[in-house]
Image (cartoon, helix red, strand yellow):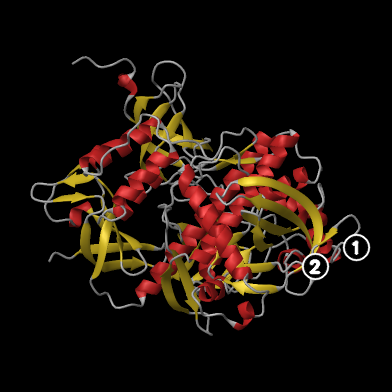
Amino acid sequence: MGRRSGDHDRRDIVVEVIDIDEEGHPVARPVKWTGRGQAPLIVLDTIRGGTSPAAGPGDLALVAVRRRMADGRRHGRVRRLLPTPPARMAGIYQHIGRNRFIASTSRRGERACPVAACDVDNVSHDDLVLAEPMDDGRLGPPRVRITRTFGSWRNTGAISLAAIAAHGIPLEFPDDVLVEARNAAAASDGEGRSDLDAIPLVTIDDDDARDHDDAVFAEPDRDGWYVIVAIADVAHHVRPHSALDREAFLRGNSVYFPDRVVPMLPEALSNDLCSLKPGVSRPCVAAHLWITGGGSLRRWHFQRAVMRSRARLTYAEVEEHRSGRPTPATSALPDRLVDHLYGVFQVLLDARRQRGAFEIERGERKVSFDSQGRISEIVLRHRLDSHRLIEELMIAANVAAARELVSRGKECLFRVHDRPSEERLESLRTFLSTRGHGSLETRRPSPGDLARVLDRAANTGERQTVEDIVLRCQALAAYSPHNIGHFGLALDQYCHFTSPIRRYADLMVHRALLGETVPDDLDRVGRHLGSLERRAVGAERHAGDHYVARWLSNRDHAVMKGCISGLGQFGIIVRAGPIDAEGLVPARYLPGGPFRYRESHQTLHGKTMRYSLGQRVNVRLAECDTNNGSLLYALVLS
């Protein structure tokens, strides 16, 4: 058979990742190109759990260049990441004999770097340090200079510090920013603001939350509901072009770790002046929403106001009250307030399902510490209805904000979520049909079509696997001035309004609603904020992997039940145990090989064994690398 045009350059090449496209795919260019014509841009596979390591801007990678895409770009799959001299690195200082080097805390395969110089005193073996490369023209791993030390790596607090340093997240605020935060007015004088002090607004958060930036209230209104969602008026304190504003834009968002938060705004604002504390007068931006009995947003109104929170409630307390076990805090509230909140939640939830938005629930790991700062427990915590209640009220307020700005003809950053690409949908169709889960009924499926796929799998043993596959086919949500709607939520207009204390995009929406100017280059701003969002997710995942590895390293290595959550020629990835810890079983340790990977069927075929995505297996922890947070499992055959 003849080779198709352009296939002569289908081979492994070295590329540099230069950008992230609107769907969240890394985009690379060849370091050296010998094919015909101009070097193409190469879009890299980002399916988690597949054969491709994660690649980000600045990375070098060996890539298998594959088919040509309709827009002229090429599709590529990362075979492996190549070491690159980092601008900075977080690592563990090792001093063994005469050798001094830094072992990286990342899984990305950086080599240990010899230490050439140190700018800080009292660095000890096994300290977590920050270092930068020294350009001395030597071959081999770059020599580095230690620029900062964070103390012993054995201290669990160093785990989040390593993630913060490795991802370049600013930790300290500049002096001028702190001065502005301290000098911010504690509250508005009330001029031009409505007075909501008499309204029994309440905040509902996790029990360990320190910032409370949204408060809610609901009561019946004719055949529907009247709702207030009051959000801390961050724009009142953070003025455009101020030092506070520049720093918030630089950070983009707050970043959350089990033992700390790196806030977008100084604590004088995030934990005090912009926190809706009980019994304290606070300026807010209130979204007044009128919702029909069918869950539709009938009308809305935004205003600057002053409010005084009636109570600081936790999700657990609200859930207990709903279950018929009122707590002292909920019992002190006006009659039926919690019931009214659940009433509007139910109609919003029904409307969500009616419009076809699909729902995928995932447990969240909760890390607890003892009085010495050691990990005392890690559990997988599933969402309560009280979590979903607040989520639906926030979505309603976000929709109202987007509709208000569109009706005024105002430019703003929408929160957009594109439909899945045809290539990813085809992979989903193949998987569903080969596994007996039916298929997608249309060539251009709606969110409701995907919701029906999830419904069909809900009562099967492969529910989580089908959810994983549906998630992997999704585009990444992004910030953009070009409104294409939100596919996952099945909404035509959507923006982020409800968390200006921790997301700069929300602060921009507040300013637009309040008639203030917004930047002209919203495309660039959206890309900037999207990249910082991905940075935060990467840092949080980095820390999470290390906490899990540290916790499991001190546990008995009993046999655990798990399922295959990813596979490829490299072997299988297994999600196992009560906290769904993911670890690798390399192909060389799998019985029944050698193997051939069939991507379309998500299976690994051997001479006598076959492994497939979602397959139930038993494993034992074989190796736990607490330096880079990776786990190796050994398969246990029954």
Residue 596 vs residue 220: left or right?
left
Spot occupied by residue 139 in the image (x, y as percentages of width and height): 45, 46
**Is the C-beta separation of discs 1 and 2 under 8 Å?**
no
The residue lying furthest to the left in this view is 608
Quarter of the picture containing the C terminus is: bottom left
Mark in the foreground, 1 or 2? 2
Secondary structure of residue under mark 2: loop
Spot occupied by residue 183 in the image (x, y as percentages of width and height): 86, 64
Residue 430 or 193: which is nearer the viewer?
193
Query: As shown in the figure, which amino acid type bears the numbered disc 2?
Result: Asp
Residue indicated by mark 1: 189
Residue 472's image quarter? top left
Spot occupied by residue 36 in the image (x, y as percentages of width and height): 40, 16
Quarter of the picture containing the N terminus is: top left
Query: As shown in the figure, which amino acid type bears the numbered disc 1?
Result: Asp
Is residue 131 in sight in this rendering?
Answer: no
Q: Residues within 10 Å of mark 1 (few under 14, many from 20)?
A: few
Residue indicated by mark 2: 197
Residue 472 or 67: which is nearer the viewer?
472
Say which mark, if any, is on residue 562. Answer: none
Q: Could you tell which of marks 1 and 2 lies nearer the N-terminus?
A: 1
Q: Is residue 84 above or below residue 121?
A: above
Q: Is residue 503 above or below residue 150?
A: above
Residue 408 or 259: which is nearer the viewer?
408
